[in-house]
């Protein structure tokens, strides 16, 4: 049996500049961090005593005899690409899927990590990210960016730069004390509804050509935010920059926000939040806010009914928690 543990991510600045059509022409920059909420992928060989050859348990259970019968796209294409059969796979997570935290990419990274571990193959973080990008964007033909796979594989608080030659991951040089102060000022709330990211990503990509100036501004904000974190300026400037970036992002397409999300955001700001954003492609999921700690009780009251998720930044990225597999999967 093999168990992998892969973190989810929160993207602060530069989302949208990680689409291939954009970064190959203009370059992309994303500032993001992983935090201590994870998905767990368990893999083990399935003995040949059943009337099916493989079993997959996620939000549903699939039992199949042939790879072509698998309905989950990422599982099907991974099984085919890596030549995996006679396997039992389970997926569990600390937070719900389709909520803007890069959950599908964390699953892809964890799955690929587990397959390599079963074969006693060393797969460094860069290769793990590249293979997960290939699985989702090429083999599954799913629209979207590439920051999620990179963040999940590497872990930590990073600047991700992208261009035609690939990607570069640079840890943000923030002191432990300043990083803790930032964490203490951030609040994460679940809006109570999810959305299908692929549909929103397709709409987002179709708007790229018309919104180049906005995306270039968001790219520059990633560098500005990094400078704030690595310097001595007030962290409140980071919060105000989040607000500015959200105003730009919500104008890229009319599907990023909606009246319910706008109302929640306005309530939080009125209660003392300096800035925030909806994580991910939009349409639902998690709202992230930056606010001085003394304003947190008022913000919780203003968003009464929403689930707040305490969190801490993490730095490991995808790891193998357990491996006693004797035969390759």
Image (cartoon, rainbow, N blue to C red):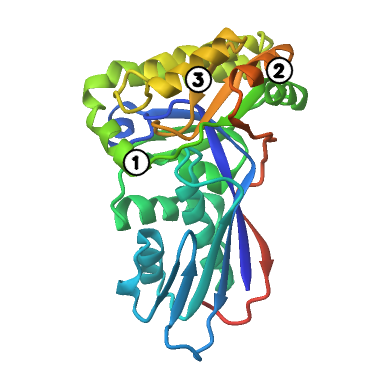
- Give the secondary structure at mark 3: helix
Q: Which residue is mark 1?
A: 144
Other-residue count near label 2 (Cα within 10 Å), few / some / many at <14 / 14–19 / ≥20: few
Q: Earlier in the sequence, mark 3 or mark 2?
A: 3
Q: Which residue is mark 3?
A: 264
User: In the orientation shown, which residue stands out farthest toward the bottom?
Assistant: 49
Q: Earlier in the sequence, mark 2 or mark 1?
A: 1
Horizontally, is 201 left or right of 40 in the view? left
Residue 281: x %, y % from top left: 39, 33
Disc 3/disc 1 C-alpha distance (Å): 26 Å
Other-residue count near label 1 (Cα within 10 Å), few / some / many at <14 / 14–19 / ≥20: many
Asked where in the image residue 227 lies, by quadrant, the reply is top right
Q: Which residue is mark 2?
A: 297
- Give the secondary structure at mark 2: helix
Q: Nearer the viewer, residue 21 or 44?
A: 44
Q: Is residue 172 above or below residue 90?
A: above
Disc 2/disc 1 C-alpha distance (Å): 36 Å
Q: Nearer the viewer, mark 2 or mark 1?
A: 2
Asked where in the image residue 219 lies, by quadrant, the reply is top left
Marks 3 and 2 close (CB-CB < 8 Å): no
Q: Earlier in the sequence, mark 3 or mark 1?
A: 1
Residue 242: x %, y % from top left: 52, 17
């Amino acid at each position: 049996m093999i168990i992998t543990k892969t973190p989810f991510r929160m993207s602060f600045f530069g989302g949208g500049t990680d689409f291939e059509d954009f970064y190959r022409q203009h370059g992309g920059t994303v500032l993001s961090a992983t935090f201590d909420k994870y998905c767990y992928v368990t893999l083990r060989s399935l003995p040949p005593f059943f009337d099916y050859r493989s079993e997959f348990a996620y939000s549903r259970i699939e039992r199949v005899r042939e790879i072509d019968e698998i309905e989950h796209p990422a599982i099907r294409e991974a099984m085919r690409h890596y030549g995996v059969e006679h396997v039992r796979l389970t997926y569990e997570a600390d937070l719900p899927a389709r909520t803007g935290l890069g959950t599908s990419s964390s699953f892809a990274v964890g799955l690929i990590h587990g397959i390599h571990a079963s074969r006693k193959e060393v797969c460094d973080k860069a290769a793990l990210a590249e293979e997960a990008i290939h699985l989702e964007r090429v083999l599954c033909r799913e629209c979207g960016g590439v920051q999620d796979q990179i963040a999940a594989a590497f872990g930590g608080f990073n600047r991700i730069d992208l261009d035609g030659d690939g990607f570069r991951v640079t840890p943000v040089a923030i002191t432990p004390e300043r990083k803790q102060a930032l964490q203490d000022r951030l609040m994460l709330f679940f809006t109570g509804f999810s959305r299908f990211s692929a549909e929103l990503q397709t709409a987002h990509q179709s708007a790229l050509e018309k919104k180049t100036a906005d995306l270039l501004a968001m790219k520059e904000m990633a560098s500005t935010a990094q400078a704030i974190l690595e310097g001595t300026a007030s962290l409140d400037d980071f919060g105000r920059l989040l607000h500015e970036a959200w105003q730009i992002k919500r104008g890229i397409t009319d599907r990023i926000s909606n009246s319910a999300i706008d109302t929640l955001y306005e309530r939080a700001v009125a209660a003392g939040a300096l800035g925030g954003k909806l994580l991910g492609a939009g349409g639902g999921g998690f709202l992230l806010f930056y606010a001085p700690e003394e304003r947190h009780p008022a913000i919780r009251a203003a968003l009464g009914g929403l689930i707040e998720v305490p969190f801490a930044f993490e730095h490991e990225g995808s790891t193998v928690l357990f491996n006693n597999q004797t035969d390759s999967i």
